[in-house]
Image: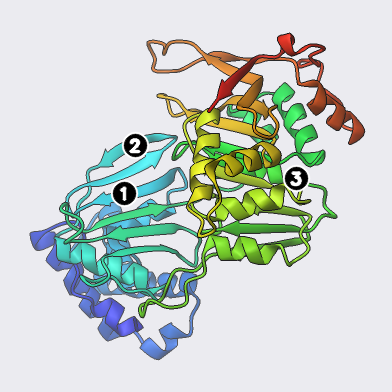
Amino acid sequence: MSLRARINSPEEHGSRGEDGHLVSSYRAKLLEEIDLAEMSALAAAERRARLERVLGHIISREGPVLSTAERSQLIRRVVDEALGLGILEPLLEDASITEIMVNGADAIFVERGGRVEQLPLRFASADQLMQTIERIVSTVNRRVDESNPMVDARLPSGERVNVIIPPLSLTGPVLTIRRFPRSFTLQELIGFGSLDEHMVYLLAGLVQAKFNIIVSGATGTGKTTLLNALSGLIPAHERIITIEDSAELQLQQSHVVRLESRPANVEGKGQVTIRDLVRNSLRMRPDRIVVGEVRGGESLDMLQAMSTGHDGSLATVHANSAEDALTRLQTLASMSDVEVPFVALHDQINSAVEVLVQLTRFADGARRITEIAVLDSHGSEPYRLATAARFEARPMTHDGQVHGAFRYFPLPRRTADRLYMAGQPIPQAFGVAQHVEQLTTREAR
C-alpha cells in the first residue's frame, strides 16, 4: 500500500465520535503538508519522526490548545493511524506483551508474564479492524477475504500472525499476534525457576553426547524457548539444520542453515511443507536436525532420520505428558502418505527417541520442566519411561504462587554408559541405577 493510501485510509482510532473525527481531520492536514516522494525515501524510524514533527507544527499553528500529555497522545494516535496499526501499535512496542488477541472489534486481550488480561481498548468498528488486518497481511503479500478467510503468516519483524474472519468466525474478525521473546540461556531459565543447576548439567551432557531429545508441552509452555536454549549446547563446529513453520529459533553457532516452510500462495500453489524440508535436510549433510514442531507426516521422516545416523536431533511436539508425547508421535507418523503398520511405528519410536523433556505452565504463569525422562525400552517392548528428574508442585499459596521442588532419580545403566563414552560426567544428584528395580519407571502404550 502506498504512503498516500495509508495516510488517506478511512479507518479511525479506537475512540468514536468527536475524538475520532479529530484524528481523521489531522491526518488529512498532515497529508497536505508533507512531500510524499521525500517521505517514501526515508527509513521507517525517520519517517515517523518527520511526521511527528510536522504534525506538532500543525497543532501549534491551528490548535486546539492541549496539555503536553494530550498533545503527545494526539500526535501518537494520528501517526499510528498513518503509518502503523492504530491502537495495536503501542501494544507491539510493549516488550512485556508476548501475545495480542483481538476477538472482534470490542475485545482485545494480551498475555503478559504468562497471564492473559483484557485491555480497555476497542476498534471503532469491525470495518476498522478488517482494514488493520488487511494492512498487516499485505506486508507479507497475502490477502484475506471471504474466499480466503484464514491466514497464518510471519511478519518481516518476526511476529507470527493468525487471522480468521467471518463466515468461519462467528465473533467477527479475529486477529492473533504472537511475539517471540528473545532467546534465553539455560542459566537465565534457572533464574526464572524453569529448571535447576543439576538438570542443566544433565541436559548439557545429553545434548553433547548426541541423544535424540523431544521437548513436549502444551501451547504456551515455552517449548521453543527451551529448544533454543538446548541448541546453544551443540558444539560450534557442527552443521545444524533448523526447520520451522515460523522461524523462531535464534541459534548462535556459526554453521547454521535455517529453513522455513511456505504456505500456498493465493492461487493455491507453491506450498512447501515441514515434511518437504525434513526430507531435503537429509541431503544437506547435517550433523544435527532441529525441528521447531512436528505436527504431521514429517514425524515419520524425523524418526527415520533419528534412527539412521542423525543422532543428537532435537524437536518439539504438542502433548500434555511424556507418555502422551510418544502416543502423539506414533499417531502423527501414521499420518504420513507412506503406509507403515502401527506396530512398526512403535518399534521406530523405541529406536529413535531417547529423551523426553516435559514442560508445564502452572496457574501462576510460571513455566517449568516437570519431567526429564529416558526412553529405556527397545524394539517391540511397551514404551518404558525412566524418570530422571521431576518437579513436584505444592498447592497454590494464598498469593497465587505455585511452589515446589525438583527431585532426581538414578539413570539407566545404558544411558550412563553412553554419557561416559562421550566424555560427559554424570551429575552426582542422579547417580546410576545398578539394578532395574532402582529405576523410577512406568510403561506406556
Would you place residue 28 above or below residue 180 in this image?
below
Residue 248 at least partly seen: no
Colour convention of the picture: rainbow
Specify whether 287 is left or right of 393.
right
Check disc 3 and give the amino acid type. Gly
Percent across and percent down for residue 174 are 25, 55
Q: What is the secondary structure assignment of the residue under circle 1? A: strand
Say which residue label 2 marks.
116
* Circle 1 residues within 10 Å: few <14, some 14–19, many ≥20: some
- Dot 3, crowdedness within 10 Å: few (<14), some or many (≥20)? many
Residue reaching furthest bottom?
A: 37
**Label 2: few (<14), some or many (≥20) within 10 Å?**
some
Q: Are marks 2 and 3 in contact (CB under 8 Å)?
A: no
Residue at screen point 44% across, 45% down: 98
Q: Earlier in the sequence, mark 1 or mark 3?
A: 1
Q: Earlier in the sequence, mark 2 or mark 3?
A: 2
**Residue located 44% across and 68% down the image:** 263
Mark 1 or 3, closer to the camera: 3
Alpha-carbon distance for marks 2 and 3? 36 Å
Residue type marked 1: Met
Per the image, label 3 sits on a secondary structure element best described as: loop
The residue under label 1 is: 101
- The circle on residue 312 is 3
Q: Quadrant of residue 387?
A: top right
- Image mark for residue 426: none
What is the tally of numbered marks visible in this picture?
A: 3
Q: Secondary structure at mark 2?
A: strand
Front-most of residues 56 and 378: 378
Q: CB of mark 2 within 8 Å of CB of mark 1? A: yes
